[in-house]
Structure formats: C-alpha cells, structure tokens
Image: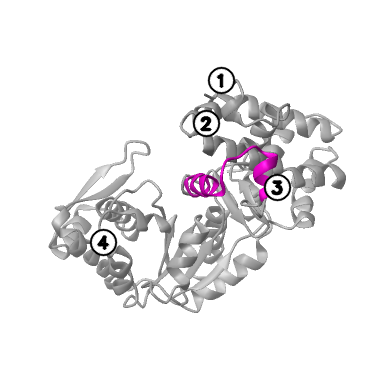
Amino acid sequence: MKPYNPFLVYGYNSPEYFCDREKETDKMISALLNERNLTLISPRRMGKTGLIKNVFYQMKRENNPNAAYFYMDIYSTRDLKAFIQLLAQNVLGELDTLSQNILRQMTAFFKSCRPIISADERSGMPTVTLDFAPTHAEQTLKEILNYMVASKKQCYLAIDEFQQITEYPEKGVEALLRSHIQFMPNVHFIFSGSKKHVMEEMFTSAKRPFYQSTQIIVLTEIPLENYYSFAHSFFAKEKRELTLETFSYLYQLENGHTWYVQSILNRLYEKKINPIDNRLVDRCINDILDEQETIYQSNLTLLTNNQVDLLKAIATEGCIKSINANDFIKKHHLKTPSSVNVALKSLLNKELIYNTPDGYIVYDRFFGKCLDNLFAISNMPISLYPSTFQ
C-alpha cells in the first residue's frame, strides 16, 4: 500500500520509500548468499532495522523467493526463556503454514516442551507459543534450531539488539548460541545492535565465543547528497521546492542521524507550505520539542544532579571528545574528573549519550536540542539552577 506521507518514521514499505543504503544492501545480500553471517552495528535510529528489511525484501524478490526470512527484536527480553519464546513465535509461526497437521508434527518433534497454537490478539493470525519449564530452556532452544535445520529451507534470521543477551541472568548464553549456530548450514544470521562498545567486544575480542565468526558492517550517516536527492524528489512531485541549502541546514542540525532527519522531513511534507525554508524547519523541530517536553522532563527527574549537569554540558557543546579536560569541566561547573566518569558511565548505560568517533553526543538529538534551548541562558550547573527538573 502506498503511504500517504513518503517520509516514513516507523516501519518499512518498499525500496521506493527507503533512502540510499545501496552499497550496504549489496554488501549484505552478497554476504548472506555466500553463507557468511553478519554483524550490523549502528546507533539506535540510524536505520539498521529498515536496512535489514530492505535486504530481506530484495532477496525475497530477486534472489531467493523460496527462502524463509525472520526478524526479531529482543530489546524487551530479560532472560533466556523470553528469548526462546520470541524465537518460537517468529520462526515456528512463519516456517510453516500452521494447521492441526503441523501441530501434530511439532508435538512429535519437540520433546522438552508443548507447542500451543493460538490467535494473536492484534492480528487474529495463528501464532505458536511453547510451554516449557525454565530448566528445559537450553534443550528447547536446541530443538527450535534443529527444527529450522530439519526444514531444509534456506533460512535467514535477523536478531536485533543482540547485545541484550549479555544482560540475561543466565550465564554462558553467548557460548550456548554459538555452539548451535556453527552447525546450522542452511540458516544464516544477522546480529544487529546499537551498543557499539558491547557489540564490538562480543565479535572482536578473542575471549568471546563469537570472535571472528561474522562479517562486521558499521552503519553510518547517509551521505548528504544522496539523502537530498531522495527528499527533493518527493517534494518535487508535489510541486514544492526543497533547496539544497535548506536541506543542508536540516541535515547538519541532526548530524545526519536518519530517524531525526526523517522525522523533520515528515513534518515538512505534512505542512503543505511553499517555499520550504530554514524557518519552517525550525518550526517543525519546535513542534516536536513541545510534544516531547513532558517526556524529557520525566527523563531528567530520574537522573542524579551530576548526570544532569554532564548531560546539559554535552548538549551545550553538541559534541565533546575530551570529556575529562580541565577546560570542559571548569566551563560547565562540573565536579571532579572521577565524578564526571561515574556520570558518564551511567549515561552511556542508559543510552542517553553516545560515543561517536568525533566525541560524545546526546543520543536523542531532539532531547539534546531541548536541553540546549532550556539552559542556554545560564552557564551555571543545573543542580544549582532553579528549574522544574529537580
């Protein structure tokens, strides 16, 4: 179905509404067809989910229409049992056309659990859940993966936010998965994640089970020229002019971060105003900030004063590489380098800031803009500044 607004903020439609990533798409398709597993690393909202779905869309249409394609986001899972349940729902519900005959086959195949077919509450479509005891989790996982191998179909499974498995209370989950995956000749994997330091450690450290087991792709910003060509074409169809100058202004404001650029383009398209200029871009951004203000205030109330002070300082700078430099600490009235490091570690774990090659930035670009606007009038630390955030 053709979308009303071509600048999609959520979901994937088709290559027509997917901007660029041609090199990355070709590289991923080539790797998967040549039976290499992939690791895809990027900040959250840089477009890795859309890229995976674009790769699967094109492979299904042009390369291997009879293969099975699975995508699962494990960000919300908290333990191995939740991971296995999600895997079962995605794989067992798609690998076969669910029927009573298939259910009988599954019941015969699975020894450690009981497959149950029920209707999804939202879609009404049949879905599979597995009834198993936590003590049988490892055996159930093995049986699901063996079921995929036994299907003899080429299978492609993308596991998004893969770093989440390092948070599970069970020990040895990485080694457990690796021990099975290396013996699945017809199943190929994409492990994608947004915590760069965790993902890199998992796949590049000789001490970790997944060491050198995949081809690694790091996703960066879409080049300005390519993004402009994509955006300009949709406005031109509406007889509206988006100049390169205005788009460059928009792109630079958000450092080319895909979701934030896309969100502003979505609002600009909605406005139906011509010409499109920098003032209209600012108006769209302010609309978004106004809508999110309550959420941003709530986020700040959950932080310590030291964390808020550091977050504000990074937002004010835009990007800061030497976070322990005396000049930076003095300029923003921060405390000792040790207290800055403690706050830094916490903000990184909460994914409120992100370490780019150029330095630390506020992860949510709109949140960073909101902080910069709120406290631009004062250089004193937020912990000393009267505000609603305390």
Image coords of residue 96 (percent x, y):
31, 59
Secondary structure beneath label 3: helix
- Comparing marks 1 and 3, which lies closer to the viewer? 3
Query: Is residue 62 at least partly visible in the picture?
Result: no
Q: How far apart in space, not on screen, are marks 1 and 4 (Cα)?
A: 42 Å
Q: If you read the primary sequence from the N terminus, does the residue marked by circle 1 or circle 4 appear first? A: 4
- In the image shown, does 353 or 339 lie closer to the viewer? 339
Image side of residue 173 versus residue 388, left or right: left
> Dot 2: few (<14), some (14–19), or many (≥20) neighbours within 10 Å?
some
Q: How far apart in space, not on screen, are marks 2 and 4 (Cα)?
A: 33 Å
Q: If you read the primary sequence from the N terminus, does the residue marked by circle 2 or circle 3 appear first? A: 2
Q: Is the C-beta separation of discs 1 and 4 under 8 Å?
A: no
Image coords of residue 147 (percent x, y):
26, 67
Quickly name the residue at label 2.
300
- Identity, as a three-letter code, of the amino acid under mark 3: Asp
Q: If you read the primary sequence from the N terminus, does the residue marked by circle 1 or circle 2 appear first? A: 2
Quickly name the residue at label 4.
171
Quickly name the residue at label 3.
327
Range of magenta residues: 326-346
Image side of residue 124 versus residue 11, left or right: left
- Identity, as a three-letter code, of the amino acid under mark 1: Thr
